[in-house]
Image (spheres, rainbow, N blue to C red):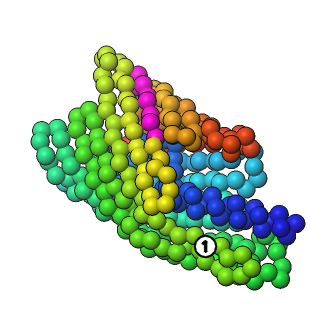
Amino acid sequence: MKYINYIFFVLALSFVVQGNAQQDPHFSMYKYNMNVITPAYAGTNGSLEALFGVRSQWVGIEDGPETLNFNVNSPIGRNIGVGLSVVNDRVFVLEETHVYADFSYKIQVADELNLYAGVKAGGTFLNIDLNELNIRNDPLFAENVSSFNPNVGVGFYLKGEQYYVTLSAPALLQNDRFEKEGVSPVSASDDTSFFLGGGYDFALSDTFTLKPSVLGRAVNGSPISVDITAAGSYNDRLELGANYRLDESVTFFLTTGFIDGVLNFGYAYEYTTTDVGTFNNGTHEVILKLRL
């Protein structure tokens, strides 16, 4: 049992390292969580937005990764926007809580074209409850881990009447998040991630809009990750779409609006196309978004 727990812990830590190497955290419906990707998004829609989301990965595996997400953003003046995001990631005995505040400033480039520049500040609370492993007389597991790593980020968001382009680095500082010395030392660190993406809305009729988008992620020491998304929107109330993450996963999602678009509900199902997909029942993601 000792070695089974040890292996499970190392696998869980490897998941967190890989997840942080790409993005802290990752969402299938990233277009609804843009302020996690770039601080410049705050206030871009001209109204208050609040979102609560749940993402459950490796369904069918006990203590699999689960993410809870809350974010809110709003303009507070003619050219200023602010936002707040709180994201809790949990897998097995590891738990991370990311808390960040955003500030953006709008620069009008032309009619119906604005450039938003933003900064992000906050950090991550890391907790690893090694006592839950029930491993005794092993120096590697003798003490729990609890720490806080501050960080800052920057981003730009160019928004036109029918399109957007985003460029950002939401976490610039490289922090050591876990490091122990023992029989088998294990360590993890945060590397700077860069995001580049964009989308365009094609109005095919008075009621139907085609919305393709793409998002690329690059981080030192990891392969470039690219999400290609296509969605169709009917009367701005119902949206159906699919996402393909190159060499990694396929996602199908839908969103629907209530009360004239004030309240939006979204659901996504993600299936891993790699060998990992044979060991679980996919990933489910649910969001509830309020616009005032």
- Disc count in the image? 1
- Between 45 and 136, the residue placed more toward the observer is 136
Question: Which residue extends farthest right?
Answer: 1
Instruction: Let me know if residue 292 appears in the view.
Output: no
Q: Main secondary structure of the magenta part?
A: strand
* Relative height, residue 190 to residue 205 (above, below): below
Q: Position of residue 19 (x, y in %)?
A: 56, 56
The question of residue 48 being in magenta is answered with no
Bounds of the magenta segment: 227-234
The residue located at (62%, 65%) in the rendering is: 95
Looking at the rendered image, the quarter that the N terminus falls into is: bottom right
Question: Which residue extends farthest top?
Answer: 205
Q: Position of residue 21 (x, y in %)?
A: 51, 59
Q: Left or right of 79: which side holds 49?
A: right
Q: Position of residue 252 (x, y in %)?
A: 55, 32
- Between 258 and 157, the residue placed more toward the observer is 157
- Between 106 and 140, the residue placed more toward the observer is 140
- Between 245 and 165, the residue placed more toward the observer is 245
Where does label 1 land, which residue? 187
Q: Position of residue 13 (x, y in %)?
A: 65, 64
The residue located at (25%, 42%) in the rendering is: 159
The question of residue 230 being in magenta is answered with yes
Answer few, some or many: residues within 10 Å of disc 1's Cα (few below 14, many 20 plus, some between 14 and 19). Answer: some
**Amino acid carrying mark 1 in the image:** Ser
Looking at the rendered image, the quarter that the C terminus falls into is: top left
* Relative height, residue 117 to residue 27 (above, below): below
The residue located at (50%, 56%) in the rendering is: 222
* Relative height, residue 38 to residue 123 (above, below): above
The residue located at (17%, 38%) in the rendering is: 112
Q: Quadrant of residue 40?
A: bottom left
